Image (spheres, rainbow, N blue to C red):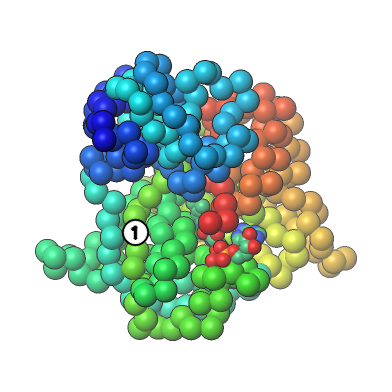
């Protein structure tokens, strides 16, 4: 088996090097070298690990053509299913601060709470077991996700963290129960306080990015609220002064969970405006009628400064919000998203 030298260059000019055998995909080989690149599905479906090969030959394995952006260059590829046939030079479309240097952590944890919060959604809280140094710090950037594995059952699913880093090893997730879903069924029927889970991560590249004091608008559908809560909680902890809006959408008013948490957040982050959006309200609903994308498009009409926009939830919501932002002239680099793709 041939091994090839791979050189990555980030958008801000940082160079990283590792080796990759011709039967191994670049994403896994990079992770083996402790270079954890932004990625989600690992199956050529989501497009998160898109990059541009500028020198060398490669084979792009099985993937979904829709995951490659329209008008991708000849060298445009998805690192999770790219196999090198020669040494490669690769240009990455993001800065080096999106790359995690180190091993993906795998740790044991225990369920400390599993509560229904409405909208067919569970709030799951875990506590990390102490590591080999005896510490149990939960260290992660807001917006990241973890993969949760049920021991012995080969079920592993990605979930966004909704809390912020802490010394006590606390991890909080908001999980919508999908009918017939493997993890959902396990949560509904078996999960209980004291049970063990294995957590892989933190992973991902979604999160706050620094752009001066530009307003930050967060658009969440359903449990897409989780990473938004994490980012807003961090803003509150650091008393960041950016104007902030949260558009939180659900089909019906009773599905708008976490209202108490959002009120508490507004008390700590007074500039935060929360716009609850109900798609199919009854006559008593006093708030915005429509999707969070409708509300976003409406408010962008009057925006004097084009905001940074953070999107999270089902892919259809994100596609619609990206189209609305583009139509109103928001530059693509000001729109960040996390898609909740099924495994
Ligand atoms: C990066 C990332 C972060 C995520 N964060 C969260 C989160 O914070 N909260 C959360 O609730 N989910 C999140 N998800 C989705 C989550 O990983 C699972 O896909 C979801 O919980 C279903 O898992 P399951 O095992 O219950 O269903 P599966 O056994 O995987 O699927 C069972 C059936 O349900 C369908 N299905 C699965 N997911 C959906 C969906 N979203 N909408 C409609 N049908 C679906 C499948 O197509 C399949 O037919 C995230 C996904 C990604 C990639």
Along the horizontal axis of the image, is 48 left or right of 15? right
Q: Position of residue 324 (x, y in %)?
A: 71, 34
Q: Position of residue 128 (x, y in %)?
A: 29, 69
Quadrant (top left, top right, bottom left, bottom right) of the N terminus: top left
Q: Quadrant of residue 49?
A: top left
Residue extending furthest toward the top: 55
Q: Position of residue 146 (x, y in %)?
A: 40, 57
Residue at 35% x, 26% y is 85
Judge whether residue 302 can be spotted in this image.
Answer: no
Residue extending furthest toward the right: 283
Vertical arrangement, residue 80 with respect to residue 185, above or below = above
Looking at the rendered structure, the number of numbered marks drawn on it comes to 1
Residue extending furthest toward the front: 1
Q: Report the residue marked by disc 1.
A: 200
**Element carrying mark 1:** strand
Residue at 12% x, 64% y is 133
Vertical arrangement, residue 180 with respect to residue 162, above or below = below
Q: Quadrant of residue 108?
A: bottom left
Residue at 55% x, 79% y is 188
Ligand 1 within 8 angstroms of badge 1 C-beta: no
Residue closer to the observer: 238 or 320: 320
Tell which quarter ligand 1 is in.
bottom right
Q: Position of residue 75 (x, y in %)?
A: 47, 20
Q: Residues within 10 Å of mark 1 (few under 14, many from 20)?
A: some
Judge whether residue 277 can be spotted in this image.
Answer: yes
Vertical arrangement, residue 305 with respect to residue 81, above or below = above
Residue closer to the observer: 8 or 132: 8
Residue closer to the observer: 108 or 327: 108
Residue at 87% x, 65% y is 283
Along the horizontal axis of the image, is 259 left or right of 27? right
């Amino acid at each position: 088996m041939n091994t090839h030298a791979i050189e990555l260059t980030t958008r801000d000019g940082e160079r990283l090097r590792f080796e990759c055998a011709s039967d191994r995909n670049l994403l896994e080989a990079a992770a083996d070298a402790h270079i954890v690149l932004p990625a989600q599905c690992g199956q050529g479906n989501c497009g998160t690990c898109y990059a541009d090969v500028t020198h060398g030959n490669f084979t792009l394995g099985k993937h979904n053509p829709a995951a490659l952006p329209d008008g991708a260059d000849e060298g445009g590829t998805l690192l999770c299913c790219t196999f090198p046939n020669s040494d490669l030079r690769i240009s990455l479309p993001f800065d080096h601060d999106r790359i995690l240097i180190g091993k993906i952590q795998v740790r044991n944890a225990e369920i400390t709470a599993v509560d229904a919060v409405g909208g067919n959604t569970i709030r799951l809280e875990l506590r990390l077991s102490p590591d080999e140094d005896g510490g149990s710090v939960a260290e992660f950037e807001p917006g990241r996700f973890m993969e949760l594995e049920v021991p012995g059952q080969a079920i592993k699913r990605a979930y966004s963290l909704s809390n912020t880093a802490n010394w006590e090893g606390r991890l909080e997730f908001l999980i919508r129960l999908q009918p017939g879903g493997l993890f959902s069924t396990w949560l509904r029927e078996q999960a209980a306080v004291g049970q063990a889970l294995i957590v892989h991560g933190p992973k991902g590249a979604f999160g706050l990015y620094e752009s001066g004091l530009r307003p930050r608008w967060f658009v969440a559908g359903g449990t897409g609220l989780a990473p938004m809560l994490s980012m807003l909680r961090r803003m509150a902890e650091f008393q960041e002064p950016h104007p902030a809006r949260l558009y939180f959408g659900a089909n019906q008013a009773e599905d708008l969970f976490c209202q108490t948490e959002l009120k508490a957040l507004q008390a700590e982050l007074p500039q935060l405006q929360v716009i609850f959006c109900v798609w199919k309200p009854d006559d008593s609903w006093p708030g915005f009628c429509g999707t969070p994308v409708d509300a976003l498009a409406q408010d962008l009409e009057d925006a004097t400064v084009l905001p940074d926009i953070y999107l999270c939830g089902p892919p259809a919501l994100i596609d619609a919000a990206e189209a609305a932002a583009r139509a109103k002239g928001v530059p693509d680099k000001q729109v960040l998203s996390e898609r909740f793709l099924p495994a």
